[in-house]
Image: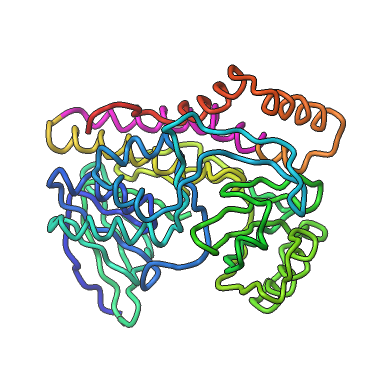
Amino acid sequence: METKIQGSSSIAIVGGGPVGLYTALILGQAGIEVFVFERSTGILRHPKAAGYFPVVLDDFKQTGIYDDVYDAGLKSTGLSWRKPRGDLLARIDFPPPTVGIQLEQYEFAEILLKHLSKCPNVTVVFGATLVYIENSPDLVIATFKRAHDEGLYKHKSKYMVGFEGFTWSDYTIITVKVVYSSHHMAPFEAANFIVDPELWGVVIKLGNDNWRITFPVRNVGGVFEDWTEEKMIQRAREVFHKLLKGPLEELRITAIASYKMHQLCATGFVEGNVILAGDAAHLTNPMGGLGLTTGLLDAALLGRILRRVLLQGQSSSQLHNYAEERRSAFLAHTNPMAIANLERLMGSKEGAVKDRDELFEQFNNGNTDCIRKFGEAQLKLSSTLGAPL
């Protein structure tokens, strides 16, 4: 096949999901030339992580996307932990004016693309699959195969940032987007964790009568089953009978997808001029939305450092500071928080039950110190809180 020279840029980003696009926006707003290569032929509309915490929203204000995200999403003012069918175990309210935003990933990506359209120095290429890279001290040459194109082509950049991404072999996660009357969904509120040894998961409201329900399927012998859409819908219907109280004949499934559940961190985030962030650097279970949150906070720090290196002539050794800081944030904070979130939902051993009951008692008694510490733990995921661009 013929090899075509695509072009060059200061930064090449492989992976056009929310984290890759957010990094491109931080760089593009500073006038840095960026190419984003995404293997899908457009923004994927699969149901995925949809929660944006205050620690991330703070950074959105600096990049100018906060108002659009706020207007498009559903505002959540607290968290609930419930049994299947909705019986309340514990609830905490965010102190006003704090809110979380619940917004589908593809809708967030569309907001980012709108803002990127104002950056003529940023190009987003869909349908481009990375084939291999040549990593030298001065540049990176990436070779791509494009959809509907017989040839290979190369792209040169000073730095390449990769976002494409320990598997929990016991479980597959199924995420379902449904349209169902909020009256029938009662008593579920905007953000709900489901506590049960087998039927644990998350139920969140996306707006009006739109909901997203995430639940596990236990894999037999640690073997991942091939989940066709028909099989996923059948399993979802079985779960809904156990989870919901309303008449299910009125529930309509609008999207469904399955995912493997991961817990993994790369040994290094920087190799030569290739930098890892987001899912390429670390993977975590989806109970709590910490994977997307941590990835966006990777972008917040990496974008700032690359701006200083490329525009202010600061040392590229700062990229190793990025690697150390963000790997430490994942291992010290994201990873244990995500595992604790999961154990809080599914744990059935005596120690796990005791820890959960004690925490829920503190929440329900309105222990402000306990609730404050629970919320402040997420601030530790950030390496840029309050830092200017």
Q: Residue drawn 19% across and 67% down?
A: 6
Q: Is residue 214 above or below residue 291?
A: below
Task: Specify start and end residues of the magenta stretch as a single range.
Answer: 314-340
Q: Is residue 192 magenta?
A: no
Give 196 or 331, whichever is nearer the viewer.
Answer: 196
Q: Is residue 364 above or below residue 32?
A: above
- Residue 224 in the image: state x and y as whole percent: 71, 63
Give 85 or 197, whichever is nearer the viewer.
Answer: 85
Q: For this view, does 77 lie left or right of residue 251?
A: left
Residue 264 falls in which quadrant of the image?
top right
Residue 306 falls in which quadrant of the image?
top left
- Tell me which secondary structure the magenta stretch mostly adopts: helix
Q: Residue drawn 31% across and 57% down?
A: 111
Q: For this view, does 271 lie left or right of residue 243?
A: left
Q: For this view, does 136 lie left or right of residue 236?
A: left
| Colour convention of the picture | rainbow
Is any atom of residue 363 visible in this view?
Answer: yes
Q: For this view, does 352 lie left or right of residue 111?
A: right
- Residue 9 in the image: state x and y as whole percent: 17, 54
Q: Residue drawn 78% across and 68% down?
A: 238
